[in-house]
Image (cartoon, helix red, strand yellow):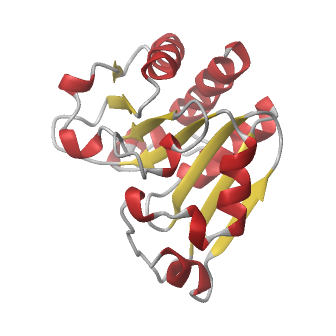
Amino acid sequence: MFDDLLAHPGVIEEMTIGSRIGIMAFHGGSLERMTDVIAEAVATASGASSYIVRQPDDLRWHIPSRLVDPTRSERLAAFIDHVDVAVALHGFGRSGLFTTILAGGANRDLASHVAGHLRGALPGYHVVDELEEIPEELRGQHPDNPVNRPRSGGVQIELPPRVRGLGPWWDDRPYEGLSSHTSDLVTGLVSALDDW
């Protein structure tokens, strides 16, 4: 199924080899908007390796993370083989959680580390890294989730629309490029990767 998505017209798969820390956004483009842009900005600023899949505007094909299979993508396999840890960016939106960022994934030390940096960078957001406080389907614990496949696993960051610069919060706030919240998010993630 994942290779079918990658073969779909307009889907772009990108992989850049940098440091042994990786940043991922495999639901990017039109699906979980801005996750790909944020991942690219973090990778550029930190020198991290990156793996990004961008869907075109006319496609919104959600493949569950556990089915994003490195045996179906040479680029994903090479990325996972190269990095020691990874951070995967996802988008979510739920009533009552529009200023909540969730830090799941199998590497709990890394999740706590990244969460601490995000709390410092985004004081207006509630950053949750206690697994029991994260909705089960957003915890990113499945061993086949690509963020958990590197040697030391990784952390799955679930981002609400507001921190990605999306939604009615920004309707009356014209800006060029990234929103102020998104810029602060990038700063926090870069700081976390640099300190790891």
Q: Is residue 167 left or right of residue 85?
A: left
State the residue in front, 115 or 84.
84
Q: Is residue 43 left or right of residue 153?
A: right
Image-quadrant location for residue 133: top left
User: Can residue 177 be seen?
Assistant: no
Q: Residue furthest bottom?
A: 9
Figure check: 147 above or below 9:
above
How many numbered circles are shown? Answer: 0
Q: Is residue 131 left or right of residue 34?
A: left
Q: Position of residue 184 (x, y in %)?
A: 58, 25
Q: Position of residue 173 (x, y in %)?
A: 48, 41
Q: Position of residue 193 (x, y in %)?
A: 67, 23
Q: Is residue 70 left or right of residue 164?
A: right
Q: Residue at x 67, y 73 (%)?
A: 12
Quadrant for the N terminus in the image: bottom left
Image-quadrant location for residue 46: top right
Q: Residue at x 28, y 43 (%)?
A: 138
Quadrant for the C terminus in the image: top right
State the residue in front, 126 or 79.
79
User: Can residue 6 be seen?
Assistant: yes
Figure check: 46 above or below 35:
above
Q: Residue at x 61, y 89 (%)?
A: 9
Q: Residue at x 34, y 31 (%)?
A: 102
Q: Position of residue 172 (x, y in %)?
A: 42, 45
